[in-house]
Image (cartoon, grey):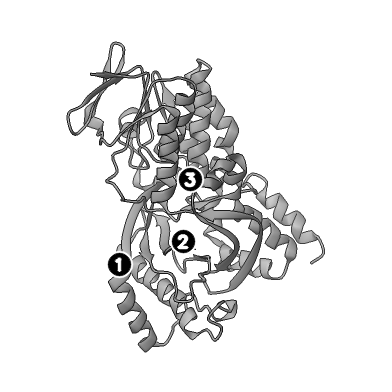
Amino acid sequence: MHNFDVLIVGAGPAGSFAAERLALAGVRVAVFDGRPPGEPKACGGGVTSKALKAWPHLLEAVGRNIDELDMYSPSGKHLHLKLDEPFAVYSRIAFDTFLRERARKAGANVFAEKVSGRGIRRTDSGWAVSTQSDAEFAAKYLVGADGANSAIAKKLAGPLPPAEMEVAFGYRAPLPDSGDAATVVAFLPNWVGYAWAFPRLDHVSFGIATTQDAFDHESLDALLWNFMISYYGSYKTARDSERVPHSIMRIWKDIDQVQADTIRGELKQTAERYAARIPGLAPRTWDTRHACGDGWALVGDAAGFADPVTGEGIYYALRSAELFAESYLAGEPLKYEARWRKDFGQELQRASQMRRRFYGNFWGAPFTDRMIEFARGHRGIRKVLGELVAGDQGYTDLKKKLARSALKPI
């Protein structure tokens, strides 16, 4: 039996960051990394400027800084945003490894072991954990950092209904021949959610995020292929091979069938598929679901901490890990609940309340169509939208900020 103070199941951003903070303070920590070596999480890999400013050491991870973004509405309307505050895009293999190695260097013990819900049991002194290789561990405290499908969360906080889960899936594909790849977010026609193209250092991450209860793989996969073909098609038809003119990206539009077949054939040979779930808690759930209890805590996706509108979760993974570590080190681990609620809980609940309206209709058209249409003609609204993308603009005062910006001169 291996004895520790804290056992952390999951070595993604939340688990590794919590382990680093605890280990630096002298806590005996074991972290279980059950993901197969080299298998990345299904994620665009975007880290907001809000996160980069909160934890500048994240810039030491190798990634690509993004200071421009192309947005497309469900009807294909286009908006080019120049961001005042750049965000970064990382390979999740590189990013997670970076954080995991920081935890190891801080003194945490990292084990390449998978832990299931059946391998966890209460004891008189805390917790006992059995890994799939039958190794035995014990500690007074248990932390679930094992993602949206968290076995720890299901056992301790209960499973989430399908309506409160989202699905992300996509492909990793080569960079365009020019090497200069645009960062694109395109809201889906007739579906809740959006598609993305996030260029990394050596490939482009394409994906779609949508609600699980409305998930139709065949239709959405066809939509994603349409998006990918349109993306590469714009490069093949561009006259300037160094930079794609924004006006020729025909997202959600038909392109030449011969060209489409050629691109599809090339991508079928090179694209690698991935898929994952993302928590998307309903407004009422934020009031009733707890992220900690006697001897246990949940952080990151395992706690449901992801933006219900965008699915972005890395900032909340890191912040929840930080708040838990502060509570534990203060000798008041149960105060973690009040800390996260005060820090970002209201913001996520507000996002949950806004999700239906964000993907609903406004003045006879999708709200995202109207949003991009208004932003195209108004500098103030573009600025607010850019701040929202960067993570600097929250949802609690978004409506007021947009209204105030709209009243200012164009």
Mark 1 and mark 3: Cα distance apart in space: 26 Å
Mark 3 and mark 2: Cα distance apart in space: 21 Å
Along the viewing direction, whichever of 361 and 34 lies nearer the viewer: 34
Pick out the residue farthest to the top: 124
Q: What's the residue type where badge 3 is placed?
A: Gly
| Percent position of residue 339, x then y | 56, 27
| Percent position of residue 89, x then y | 50, 55
| Rendered image quadrant of residue 145 | top left
Is residue 287 toward the left or the right of residue 144 in the image? right
Q: What's the residue type where badge 2 is placed?
A: Leu
Residue at 39 percent across and 69 percent down: it is 174
What residue would you read off at disc 3? Answer: 313
- Decide: is 356 above or below 264: above
- Decide: is 298 above or below 196: above
Residue at 62 percent across and 64 percent down: it is 371
User: Which of the marked residues, 1 or 3, is nearer the chain's N terminus?
Assistant: 1
User: Which of the marked residues, 3 or 2, is nearer the chain's N terminus?
Assistant: 2
